[in-house]
């Protein structure tokens, strides 16, 4: 085929490929997966070649301005991964390609075939209940039969390496690559010494753009076999990928907070489908989605038991707490006992309520105790304090901080968030506190009849998951359906609302019978970076049906002025 026309995508939220004439001097060199410089909407942009043809249906075409690569930056496997990634997470193919590139290559900079292979890779120092029956399955299996997925449920944080060491070692010994994904820098620092006993990993998301680019090249060329990084690490071009390890797979930090709104666990499973590699989901509080994969026979559960602190309740049903106090009378009695017995106590409070008021009241009630607060504004962890009042940032220290007693001041607040994942959030919170506590975890509640709370106290994991999965199945929530949010944002609040309503009317006119559509409402994050956000939510059991319809409408929808529409699957 004569390569006269190049079909190119750009890193913008626009669907489809765009035709450009390919100058004769580039025709012998150009290949799919190469970056090019093109003019798009009167602006010079980096694009990626998807395919070629000898002719176009469009009469007048712009030429490719420059070929930026001597060899493809995207292998055929990564091109295919980008295609399914874009379909799964509702972004354009160009946005997917852009997400896969290091920042250095998102600019129109030329890349030689291979950097100097003698150059060292920069090393960055780093300070038996019955199972719930599954609902209708997708048209394409989520994980293929030849892709092995393991859910490593390490309840106490201490035994996961019994499974991971031999798994990673065997992968590397077979000449395959490994990606380790972590939710935060604290966990990364904790696992690096162990990984370095197996091989020298490339640490991503550190250093300058140029250093990040050199890391990317080392992984793509096979000079480095193991990568460690945050959420975007799952997209790195590790050669001959054999294993992806997602540490603490339930973490909320694995959901990208801007378009494309991909989820690291789901992206890893998609990549496994394309590259036929293994996936290890490591956790001490499995997500409902991961547990469902086990129940559906698409993942293997490895339960690593450990002795954890028991869960107790402080029943507030008959207690009336004054508005000017955080501490119930019963809790003050517990604190007096703890102080007398020289016990170290963690008081957990929601970040929205703040630690300052609790610290002040505790100091008034117990002037003889060493009391300190710890939240995201704190500069150092108060290791010497006898009582630490903390928000969720305390879990940064889950691998080393230890308390005798942990108290959740208001577990009911956690349960009654407007979020279908709230119950699992309480389970994860309790599990993490038990791992940090020697004697017991105390949950203050006014709802002693809550069955899920009692499953926590009875340490009955399977009952908890079966009950919660049953509730989600009954309500039609993930993982038994897909929720697709179309978020309309604009600097003008009225325009954002009006455009969301207009989009809703268009969607409603062509809605498939198998899909539910919810009326426009303000997004959970109503204002982000000065942009007002409105949301239209679609819901259905088939992602193919929901996303196909949504993408078709989005492709034809022309927002007014500065309005932008993004798609978020299972927000």
Image (tube, helix red, strand yellow):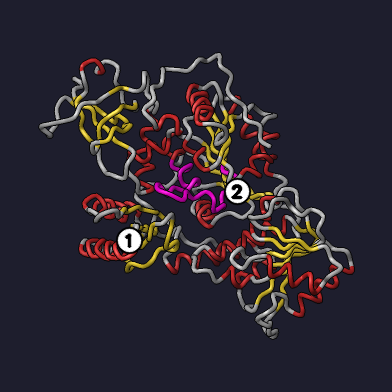
Regarding residue 128, the answer to whether it shows in the image is no
Q: Estimate the spatial distance between the alpha carbons at disc 2 and disc 1, rounded to whole Å.
A: 39 Å
- Identify the residue position indicated by label 1 in the image: 492
**Crowdedness near tag 2: few (<14), some (14–19) or many (≥20) residues, C-alpha within 10 Å:** many
In-front residue for pair 180/513: 180
Regarding residue 300, the answer to whether it shows in the image is yes
Residue drawn at 31 percent across, 32 percent down: 47
**Crowdedness near tag 1: few (<14), some (14–19) or many (≥20) residues, C-alpha within 10 Å:** some
Q: State yes or no: discs 2 and 1 in contact (Cβ < 8 Å).
A: no
- The tag on residue 248 is 2
Q: Quadrant of residue 377?
A: bottom right
Q: Is residue 199 above or below residue 139?
A: above
Q: Is residue 67 above or below residue 95?
A: above
Please say whether residue 253 is one of the residues in the magenta stretch.
Answer: yes
Residue drawn at 58 percent across, 66 percent down: 352
Which quadrant of the rendered structure holds the C terminus?
A: bottom left
Q: Is residue 423 above or below residue 255?
A: below
Residue 52 shown left or right of residue 356 in the figure: left
Residue drawn at 26 percent across, 15 percent down: 28
Q: Give the magenta range.
A: 246-270
Please say whether residue 181 is one of the residues in the magenta stretch.
Answer: no
Instruction: Tell me where residue 121 appears, x and y as whole percent.
Output: 58, 22
Instruction: Tell me where residue 314 appears, x and y as whole percent.
Output: 72, 75
- Outermost left residue: 59
Secondary structure under tag 2 reads loop
């Amino acid at each position: 085929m004569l390569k006269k026309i190049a079909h190119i995508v750009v890193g913008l939220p626009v669907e489809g490929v765009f035709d450009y004439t390919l100058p004769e001097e580039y025709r012998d060199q150009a290949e799919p997966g190469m970056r090019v410089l093109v003019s798009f909407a009167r602006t010079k942009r980096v694009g990626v070649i998807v395919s070629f043809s000898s002719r176009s249906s469009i009469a007048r075409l712009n030429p490719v301005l420059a070929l930026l690569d001597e060899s493809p930056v995207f292998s055929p496997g990564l091109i295919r991964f980008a295609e399914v990634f874009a379909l799964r997470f509702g972004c354009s193919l160009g946005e997917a390609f852009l997400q896969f590139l290091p920042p250095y290559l998102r600019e129109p900079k030329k890349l030689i075939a291979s950097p100097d292979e003698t150059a060292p890779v920069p090393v960055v120092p780093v300070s038996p209940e019955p199972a719930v029956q599954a609902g209708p399955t997708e048209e394409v299996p989520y994980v293929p039969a030849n892709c092995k997925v393991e859910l490593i449920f390490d309840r106490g944080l201490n035994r996961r390496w019994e499974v991971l060491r031999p798994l990673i070692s065997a992968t590397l010994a077979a000449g395959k690559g490994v990606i380790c994904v972590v939710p935060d820098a604290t966990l990364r620092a904790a696992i690096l010494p162990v990984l370095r006993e197996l091989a020298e990993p490339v640490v991503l998301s550190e250093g300058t753009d140029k250093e990040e680019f050199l890391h990317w090249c080392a992984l793509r060329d096979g000079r480095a076999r193991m990568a460690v990084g945050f959420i975007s690490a799952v997209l790195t071009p590790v050669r001959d990928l054999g294993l992806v390890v997602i540490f603490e797979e339930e973490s909320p930090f694995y959901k990208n907070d801007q378009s494309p709104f991909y989820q690291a666990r789901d992206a890893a499973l998609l990549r496994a489908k394309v590259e036929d590699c293994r996936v290890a989901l490591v956790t001490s509080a499995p997500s409902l989605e991961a547990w469902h994969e086990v129940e559906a026979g698409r993942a293997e559960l490895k339960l690593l038991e450990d002795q954890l602190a028991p869960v107790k309740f402080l029943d507030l049903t008959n207690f009336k707490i004054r508005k000017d106090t955080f501490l119930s009378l019963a809790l003050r009695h517990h604190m007096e006992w703890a102080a007398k017995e020289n016990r170290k106590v963690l008081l957990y409070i929601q970040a929205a309520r703040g630690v300052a008021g609790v610290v002040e009241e505790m100091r008034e009630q117990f002037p003889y105790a060493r009391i300190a607060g710890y939240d995201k504004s704190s500069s150092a962890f108060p290791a010497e304090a006898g009582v630490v009042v903390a928000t969720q940032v305390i879990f940064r220290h889950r691998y080393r901080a230890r308390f005798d007693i942990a108290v959740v001041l208001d577990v009911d607040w956690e349960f009654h968030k407007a979020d279908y994942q709230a119950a699992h959030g309480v389970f994860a919170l309790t599990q993490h506190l038990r791992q940090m506590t020697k004697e017991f975890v105390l949950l203050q509640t006014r709802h002693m009849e809550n069955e899920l709370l009692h499953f926590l106290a009875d340490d009955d994991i399977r009952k908890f998951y079966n009950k919660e999965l049953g509730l989600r199945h009954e309500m039609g929530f993930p993982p038994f359906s897909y929720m697709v949010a179309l978020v309309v944002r604009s600097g003008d609040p009225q325009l954002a609302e009006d455009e969301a309503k207009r989009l809703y009317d268009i969607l409603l006119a062509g809605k498939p019978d198998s899909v539910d559509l919810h009326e426009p409402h303000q997004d959970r994050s109503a204002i982000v970076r000065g942009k007002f956000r409105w949301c239209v939510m679609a819901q259905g059991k088939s992602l193919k049906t929901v996303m196909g319809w949504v993408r078709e409408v989005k492709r034809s929808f022309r927002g007014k002025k500065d309005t932008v529409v993004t798609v978020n699957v299972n927000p």
